Amino acid sequence: MAGNRRAARIGSAVSGGTAVVTILVAMVTNYVTANPPTWAENSLLVWSVFGVLGAVSLGLVLWERRLAGEPEGGARPVALERIAAVSGHSMNPPAVSVPVRGRDAELERIGQLVRGPGGGMVVVCGAGGLGKTTLAAEAAARARAEGRVVVWIRWRDDATQLGQDLAQAAHILGLPEARLEEARTGRVSLVDAVWEHLATVEGWLIVVDNVDTPTRVGPGSGALSAYRGWLRPHGGGALLVTSRDTSPQTWGPDAGLLALDPLADKAGGAVLLDAAPHAGTEGEAEALAARLGGLPLGLNAAGTYLSVPTSRHRTFATYQHALENEFGDLLGAEHPAAATDPETARRVVRHTWDLSLDQLHHDGYTLARPALQLLALLAPAPIPRTLITPSLVTDATGLPATAATVEAALAGLHQYGLIRTPPATAPETAEPSVGQLQIHLLVREVTAHTLPHSQLTEALNAIDQHLSQAVTALADLPGRAGWPLARLLAPHLPPHLDRSTPQDFMTALGVLDDLADVLSSAGAHSDELLLRRHVVEAETLQLDPNHPDILGSRNNLASALNQLGEHQQAAALHRQTLADHERTLGPDHPHTLTSRSNLASALNDLGEHQQAAALHRQTLADRERTFGPDHPHTLNSRNNLANTLNDLGEHQQAAALHRQTLADHERTLGPDHPHTLNSRNNLANTLNDLGEHQEAAALHRQTLADRERTFGPDHPHTLNSRNNLANALTGMGEHQEAAALHRQTLADHERTLGPDHPHTLNSRNNLANALTGMGEHQQAVDLHQQTLADHERTLGPNHPATLGSRNNLANALTGMGEHQQAAALHRQTLADRERTLGPDHPATLGSRNNLANALTGMGEHQQAVDLHQQTLADHERTLGPDHPHTLTSRNNLTAARALLNAPSMWRRWLPRLR
């Protein structure tokens, strides 16, 4: 520094001397020309004076120029002149004034890169508004706190300026000025000199923020992924880039991509509470965060608004409610500076995505903005890729479109993070899926909000037309080919019905009903329920209360509810529909008989077996009389009656009906028809209850294979077959194989139906039973306790499934030696089963047998013998002398008598001999 100041002083003196000499030359010239003295006539003397002054002047000029280009220690390169000229902007990272929420994993990954050996490049990427700059600033602050050199560079869409900034960063990190001089003179490449030096220095972090146009990074026109330009992954420290470009092809194989997702509700709620701590509860903050889709830019905008004392809406709840009617004012408002200032546009929800759309348009993706507007008019749910056809784009936007231009537009939107495309096959199953497009909630709302009203009607009409065509084509597909597409289309259909005119209302109803039928066949009952409920609500507003379509729709809604385990709601709705059908159509109308059959099935699922059996008997008789013995409805009634009889413990009668129904189904519908497979499954269940485990297992294996082939691995019927096969294996003593199947089925039920569905609870109960058979009593007790609590909560204390859970928990406790607790549960269960199922039901007899076993464990041998004698007599009377339950009763009675009559010293050994 001292040398630089000395050179500056000398340079100033030289410049002054040069000026003085120049003035003297001018004065002498003027003097000798205006008033020539005597000596001026001497030409030799005059030219000598001019020569001396000219030589001095030239020498001073050369000396001045050398001093001007000479830094301390040598020549001052032009590169540093340029650096000095542009160093007016700060290269310090921006301060982070609030906690960064929900990004711990991302910060740790960046921290590992910064702290680890070898350096590298990580690209934090995603759509605008996800908080990329904030994340990078927090990472920079942490690196600086660890004592590392941190340089922050903001990409300004100018490769030359980026080069100057990186050269200055390298100079800060010790790049010799002699090396820069070599670059100035063209002996080496400046970009290579910078990165060759950065490769030798460790521990630094350079952030290049907002590189949203990576093709312009340079130098030159080569691809960034070739790593010959200004951004390279080969430094000794860490290069952190933020960008909206999410394409791996852009950044190359050696760059680590860190794609940001929206914040989870909990983290988003924390962001809101940080900004407005008095605006509501944690739950209300998380609800608003979910409404805003976890987008940090939206969360910050909402938090800033709520923190202002003069805002109209001061709480999370009122702000969320206001979004429904005031979205344009709260989040969709324009900013006057956004059109000319990209940095302002980045910070405004209304404008931030325009930057990406403008860039895509500039790059030739002219359909990107229209395509995004089209997607925004569909429901906030995944959109099937096959729906976005060139004809739809043209019909909706009026713009010419081809398959190639539509594909390019969607690819561009995906590259900039404005849409997402999950994989075409669900990873957890082998079930084929459909390509889908996902658009963030706020991107959708802002895009739809900014669509000119003049384009809205035409676009929605085109969407409705193409949705209808898609459903029509779907209904004609064979087998399960259309099921994945049906699931994706379901949430987009209700708005189609809402937009229908009175003239096309019935046509739109038919479209929803057709799709709901496909979903029902697919076992997608949650999606089906969405459509069934919407149809009933729309018909209630538009049609007469007694219109046949309303009654049919109500029946379909009740059936969907029953499939989802909502048996109470289903039964109530079926009762109402049955009464209306009988009143308007008469007792023998097919719709009336369907209502009665469905009510009986719901009652059976509620455990009201006697009432269900009576209704099924009546319906079977009426259907045989009106349709004949071979009609599918008649066979369905016979199947349903057999199931109810089996639940009543009438296994022999149930098996006979199932055998007859299976034969008729195979004869009239073929071996692979769903009704045939259902009959075979039900016959196998009844055989298993009769103790014919080998035959039951063989039928279940066959049915499981056929259902996997025809329905797929995740269909409820397939999962039911796997569960039933496992039960038969348990009956055979194959507990290991049974437990493995039950674990798989439980996981699939939880994933597809949820944790509280009756099928899920049944799977958990059955797994616990298999664990008991394996001697894993503690695991079994834990599962049974959880299942019992869930059954009591969802089905009530008296439902047969609840009583079964209590019985099974008591059995597991007996296995652990907790005989007192087990006996108490068995007494309670026995009383409840006698009251609800009757004294002769197999489940009641099972409870009495289990109570006697618990009493044996307690040493109450006389009570145990008495109960076993009663149970054996009832089993022989109701099931016959050779039924497995009868044989078990006889064995238990023999063991109990032996214990009663044995000397006390022997009693502890005899139970082991049973």
Image (spheres, grey):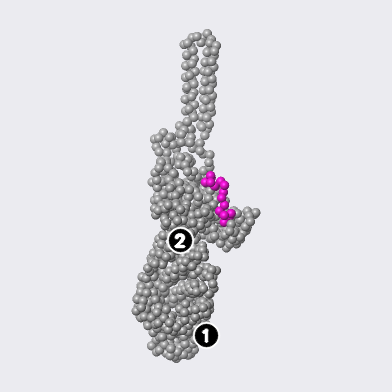
Q: Please state which amino acid type lies under the numbered disc 1.
A: Arg
* Left or right: where 618 falls relative to 698: right
Residue 734 seen in this snapshot: no
Q: Main secondary structure of the magenta part?
A: loop
The x and y percentages for residue 513 are 46, 69
Foreground residue among 586 and 245? 586
Q: Is residue 117 magenta?
A: no
Instruction: Provide the residue designation for mark 2.
Output: 465
User: What residue is at 48 percent from the left and 83 percent from the top?
Assistant: 615
Q: Is residue 339 magenta?
A: yes
The x and y percentages for residue 138 are 52, 51
Residue numbers of the magenta segment:
327-344
Q: Please state which amino acid type lies under the numbered disc 2.
A: Gln
* Left or right: where 656 falls relative to 70: left
Compared to 888, does 228 lie above or below?
above
User: What residue is at 39 percent from the left and 44 percent from the top?
Assistant: 222
The mark total stands at: 2
Which numbered disc, 1 or 2, marks the residue that appears first in the sequence? 2
Where disc 1 sits, the SS reads helix
Instruction: Provide the residue designation for mark 1.
Output: 835
Compared to 611, does 718 lie above or below?
above
Residue 184 seen in this snapshot: yes
Compared to 711, does 12 lie above or below?
above
The x and y percentages for residue 550 are 51, 72
The x and y percentages for residue 640 are 43, 80
